[in-house]
Image (spheres, rainbow, N blue to C red):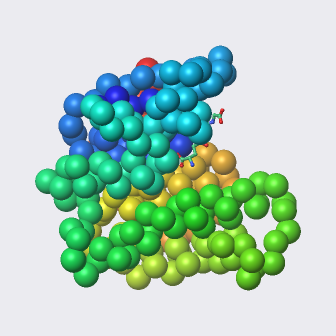
Amino acid sequence: MRLFWAPNTRSMRVLWMLEEIGAPYERVLVDLKAGAQHTADYHAINPMEKVPALQDGASCVAESGAIIAYLAEKFPEAGLAPPVGAAMRGRYLQWLFFSGSCIEGAIAQKFTGAQMPEGTAGWGSFDRVFNVLEEVLSATPYLLGGKFSAADVLIGADLHFAIDVFKMLEPRPVFASYLERCQSRPAFQRAAEINSDGI
Ligand SMILES: N[C@@H](CCC(=O)N[C@@H](CS)C(=O)NCC(=O)O)C(=O)O
């Protein structure tokens, strides 16, 4: 598997997931500042010309949530996704999609200051998105209950960026202890180290 990535980007989500799985992979650095994402070769990997993207033999997959879902399914022995038919499978898919459908929109709205009616914006509002996450995470240690899953990789990485890196969200106690649980994982720490080395 080859991960196309760049440091300090949404690639961190997939780096962390790959480190959780522990299967061998190669990192291919895409120099965003030099415009390496806008070449014909990279366009064939991800037509959006963005990182991350994963190439796995003849398969290519882009969009962080899709890559994480792909990896969780390819490596079921890592135990990061409830199997099809399990009671938590629905919630698992919900939280995987929540990142792109709700968190991204909420953050973009906050960043730009754009005004939108709550009933029209798919994420409702910035506050609604993070209040919902706070409600879930105050009831259980992880999104699916007591067990860490790939949904925590994606949403944990989103909260890490929103709170620790971009300081867009106040560090509510529930998020602080959730992030502590997530960030104490050796896989998160390896990914953070790779991310900061930029290698
Ligand atoms: N929806 C994509 C977003 C990916 C994305 O926006 N990546 C940014 C870095 S965080 C990027 O590659 N930007 C370079 C560019 O657009 O030229 C995902 O979730 O993976």
When asked about the image quadrant of residue 25, the answer is top left
User: Which residue does the image show at 59% across and 33% down from the upper left?
Assistant: 49
**Left or right: 146, with 128 as reference point:** left
**Left or right: 153, with 163 as reference point:** left
When asked about the image quadrant of residue 168, the answer is bottom right
- In the rendered image, residue 141, in percent from the top left (x then y), is placed at 36, 72
| Residue nearer the viewer, 115 or 19 | 115
Quadrant assignment for the C terminus: top left
Quadrant assignment for the N terminus: top left
- In the rendered image, residue 22, in percent from the top left (x then y), is placed at 22, 39
Please give the count of numbered marks on the rendered protein. Answer: 0
User: Which residue does the image show at 47% across and 60% down from the upper left?
Assistant: 155
Q: Ligand 1 is found in which quarter of the picture?
A: top right
- In the rendered image, residue 158, in percent from the top left (x then y), is placed at 53, 55
| Residue nearer the viewer, 60 or 150 | 60
**Which residue is farthest left?**
77
**Which residue is farthest top?**
34
User: Which residue does the image show at 52% across and 25% down from the upper left?
Assistant: 42
